[in-house]
Amino acid sequence: MKKTSSWLPFYLIVGFIWGCSFIFIKGGLEFLTPYGVAFGRCALGALTLYAVAKKRKIQLPRNKKALFHIWVVSLLLNVFPGIFFALAETKVTSILAGIINAVTPLMTLIAILVVNREEKPKGPQVLGLSIGFTGVLVVLGVWNGLGDNPWWAVAVLLIAVALYGISYPYTRRFVMPMGIKPEAVVAQQLVLASATLLPFYLYDGIARDEYRLAPVLSMLALGVFGSGFAYLWNFRVMELAGSAISSSVTYLTPVVAVIVGVIFLSEKISWNEPVGALVVLLGAAIAQERIRLTRP
């Protein structure tokens, strides 16, 4: 592993950008519908990564089989979650959305276990999943019902992170064996997501014909950085420090989401949300065996 100083700046920037994504979504919703936010972030991300690919002379995949599987990944990672997160944030805080997003590693583990049914779950995985989903219940404050959060908004957030989870084993099984450069996959993925979302944007993408500076900048940041450069920088972290470090950025994003939601949107936070978030992160860390409770 190279010196921490070489990858840490990229790591922190990615964590900050992805943690801010949830307030950027809130900003975009001031003039766009959930369809508009989903399309805008994908289209801006696609333009950014396509320009980078052209500059680096990276060819985007054109094989029909590859395009089909990358399109499926775009549905799982961009199209449906993009709509669902924006839809939910019309009713819930960016803080709650950011914390629920932290459940992704647990959903990924479940998806992997379902796909590989012959592989029995290990003790740490069972314990981590149990702790993690207990944390979700704490975040939601189930002893108070769901508080001010509509059940359907919480449901679509959980469906969105479940789709994130499914995308990993699908990508590993159908896309990675093709040997396509990650930058090319993500660029093509966003191009296909944009094409899929375009009809929805044209039908019902604009909420109000007002284009104030702050909401427009929010969408630019969400697309160009959140769905564009952040992926490239995360690949850089992976190259310099390995996949274990790069994937651990998931633990940083909810912390950023809570801080920026309180500071910039003056969102109220209940005691159970940060406590539950810590329990979720603890469960994810145990399930991924980042924290070992017994000696190897």
Image (spheres, helix red, strand yellow):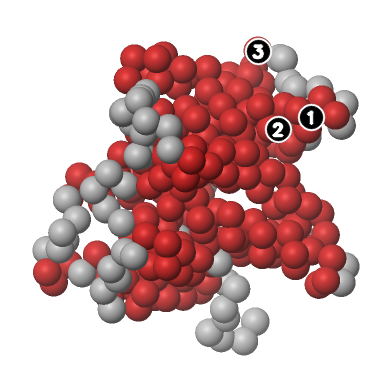
Q: Nearer the viewer, mark 1 or mark 3?
A: 1
User: Marks 3 and 2: in contact by CB < 8 Å?
Assistant: no
Residue 24 horizontal side relative to residue 273, left or right: right
Q: Which residue is mark 1?
A: 53
Q: Residue 133, located in which quarter of the rendered image?
A: bottom left
User: Looking at the image, which residue is at 66% across and 65% down?
Assistant: 12
Task: Name the secondary structure under disc 2.
Answer: helix
- In the rendered view, tell whether residue 10 sits above or below residue 79: below
Instruction: Rate crowding at label 3 as few (under 14), some (14 to 19) or many (20 or more) other CA atoms within 10 Å.
Output: few
User: Looking at the image, which residue is at 31% across and 56% down?
Assistant: 93
Label 1 or label 3, whichever comes before in sequence order: 1
284 or 127, nearer to the observer: 284
Q: CA distance from mark 1 to mark 3?
A: 20 Å
Q: Which residue is mark 3?
A: 64
Q: Which residue is mark 2?
A: 49
Give the position of the C terminus as an image quadrant. bottom right
Percent coordinates x, y for residue 183 in the rendering: 74, 36
Percent coordinates x, y for residue 27 in the rendering: 41, 45
User: Looking at the image, which residue is at 67% across and 59% down?
Assistant: 13
Label 2 or label 3, whichever comes before in sequence order: 2
- In the rendered view, tell whether residue 114 sits above or below residue 264: above
